[in-house]
Amino acid sequence: ETQREELTRRLSALEGEKADGNREAAQLREQLATSQSTLQATEAERQALTQRLEALEPEKAAVDAQLADLQVQVRQLQADQIRDQEVLGRLRGQVATLQSNNNTLETALQSLQEELEVAHTARLDRDAQIENLHRALDHAQTQNAEMQDTWNALQDAMGKVQAENAQLQAERDQAIQERIALQSEHGELQAELATLRQINATHEQHWTELHRLLLGSSLAEGEAPDPLQLAAALQQQRDRLSELEAALEKVTDERAQLEAERDRLTTELEQAIAQQKKLQQSLKRRPTSKSRPKRAEGRDPLSEIPGIGPVYEQRLYEAGITTFAQLSQLSPERIREIIKLKSKRKIGPESWITEARAMTEAESEES
């Protein structure tokens, strides 16, 4: 019974499946009919497309030609793009150069602004210097008369010194001529002394020979000279030689005296020339202590040096540089650091140091 029920259920299921299969078969037949109609339509459409494709063949050839032209144009555009990239690279380089130039111009502008500030400060310094120069000019005009009197006195002194120089030169020339004459006389005396020495040597030889003959054997009468006469002649020659030696010694002493006199005259001439040069330098030397303002609180007027105005002078004072001697011992870099000088000027710290050293030496000479 159970199997029958199972078979019944299975039969019912199979019948349901059969009904479903019939429905599916009907659907498939419908789909087949639809597919056949679609296939027919597709075939017709294929034929139409084939005909259309055959009709489009000339257009395809034209399109291929256009495509080839387009490829050529694309290659040309690619070449143009490469050139454009190169131009773009050059333009970028030019832009970088322009940016660098812009930075340089900005730096130069900043430097010009600093120089403008320094120039403004220098202008203030020059104005102060002009005012100082006006005061110094007024003071110099008051001293002009005194300098003229001093000049006249120095001119008179120079005339006297030149006259003394001429006299000393004449005495020196005379001493030189006397020395030349003494040298000539000394040479003659030397030659005469040499001759007398030779004669004396000959006489000594004769005397020795006569002495040997007299002691060795007796001479025949009239053959040998008189020994007394020979001795007297020899003594005369010796006396003459002594006189010549004394004269030579005297001439030597006179020559030494003339050389000493020549040295004295040369020294006096050199002193006179040095005095003349000193007078000429004193004429050219500008007034220092008279025209220079007095020190204030132990400070030197540093603004007297060209290029140093009140601003720089105050900065030097604040740094402890209050005298010309201290300024002359500094280096140009240290001075620039003190006065905060950022640009190179025509009159810079190098000339300040030289001028300060000259003023220090002038003060030392005055003291």
Image: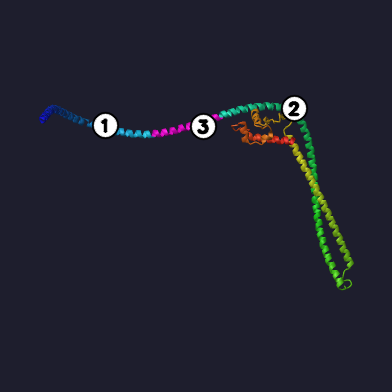
Q: Is 103 one of the magenta-colored residues? A: yes
Identify the residue at image location x=77%, y=32%.
150
Range covered by the magenta-colored residues: 83-111
Secondary structure found at label 1: helix
> Is 164 on the left or on the right of 320, as rendered?
right
Mark 2 crowdedness (10 Å alpha carbons): few <14, some 14-19, many ≥20:
few
Residue 337, given in percent of the width and then of the height, sits at: 61, 33
Of pointers 2 and 3, the one earlier in the residue sequence: 3
Of pointers 1 and 2, the one earlier in the residue sequence: 1
Secondary structure found at label 3: helix
Task: Give the foreground label among 3 and 1.
Answer: 3
Q: Quadrant of the N terminus?
A: top left
Residue 230, given in percent of the width and then of the height, sits at: 87, 66
> Is 157 on the left or on the right of 35, as rendered?
right
Residue 142: which numbered mark, if any? 2
Identify the residue at image location x=81%, y=49%.
258
Residue 104: which numbered mark, if any? 3
Q: Quadrant of the C terminus?
A: top right
Of pointers 3 and 1, the one earlier in the residue sequence: 1
